[in-house]
Amino acid sequence: SQQGEEDPQALSIQEGENATMNCSYKTSINILQWYRQNSGRGLVHLILIRSNEREKHSGRLRVTLDTSKKSSSLLITASRAADTASYFCATATSGGYQKVTFGTGTKLQVIP
Amino acid sequence: GAVVSQHPSRVICKSGTSVKIECRSLDFQATTMFWYRQFPKQSLMLMATSNEGSKATYEQGVEKDKFLINHASLTLSTLTVTSAHPEDSSFYICSARSDRGRGETQYFGPGTRLLVL
């Protein structure tokens, strides 16, 4: 079963605006990752945050993690048309082979 | 980042035939590879996890006799859809966990679109 749920399911913004996507999960995790998927393509790894971290930055991306609320957010600043894609959060539990479970995804459309 | 390839990228087959999909890690060794299935406009669903040299671990509800997985080497895993039916039509994506660093990140292949007629 899917671990994470993302919200919103779809988001449409103007180029230059910021986009925020949220992910909530159910069980304790070891790491949380965000991926991007362009239509009909494979996934591109964006950023990884560990359970003992609260915030991470990578270029125009900012990820936060609140383990007490079991939630994470992905912020894309100064969005570009090329950011149009589906974004998934993926959680992994500790131990074993760290099976990764994907959320439901947010479809982002950036309008030029 | 690490590169994972899949072959073929697209396949159309007749109902009842078997289809083999290859997943290769090109510039790293992957002791663990994962196979996912994605239906249109849905998220990825993990089908199975394969470790090199051992039997794959299948998720609940995934038929191991229908989806045969072979992880023959540290850089190659194959998924064979046996006796394919139209309901098996889907986007199949593999991923490999890199042996670099902490080995936490999964790198994904570009996916294989299967259409069963």
Image (tube, rainbow, N blue to C red):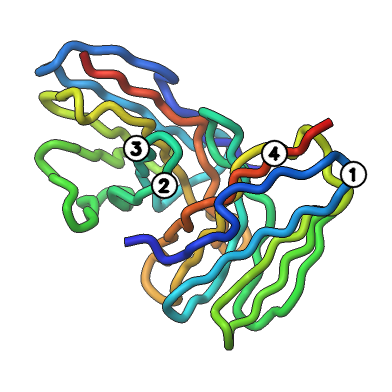
Residue type, label 3: Ser
Question: Do badges 3 and 1 share one subunit?
Answer: no
Q: Of the residues tagged 3 and 1, which is closer to the observer?
A: 1
Identify the amino acid type marked 2: Leu
Is there a contact, CB below 8 Å, between mark 3 and mark 1?
no
Q: Are marks 3 and 2 in contact (CB under 8 Å)?
A: no
Task: Name the residue type under label 4.
Answer: Gln
For mark 2, give the secondary structure: strand
Q: A10 or A90, which lies in front?
A: A10
* Residue ID for mark 2: B44
Give the labeled residue for mark 1.
Answer: A16
Select label 4 or label 3 by which is in front. 4
Which chain does tag 3 point to?
A: B
The residue at the point 77 percent across, 44 percent down is A13
Q: Which residue is depicted at the point 68% across and 51% down? A: A46
Write down the residue under mark 3.
B77
What amino acid does circle 1 point to? Gly
Mark 3 to mark 2 CA distance (whole Å): 18 Å
SS at mark 1 in the image: loop
Q: Is residue A52 left or right of residue B39?
A: right
Number of other residues with Cα within 10 Å of mark 1, as a class: few under 14, some 14 to 19, many 20 or more: some
Residue B72 visible within the image: yes
Position of residue A101 in the picture relative to residue A8 (left or right): left
What percent of the width, then of the height, locates residue A16?
Answer: 90, 44
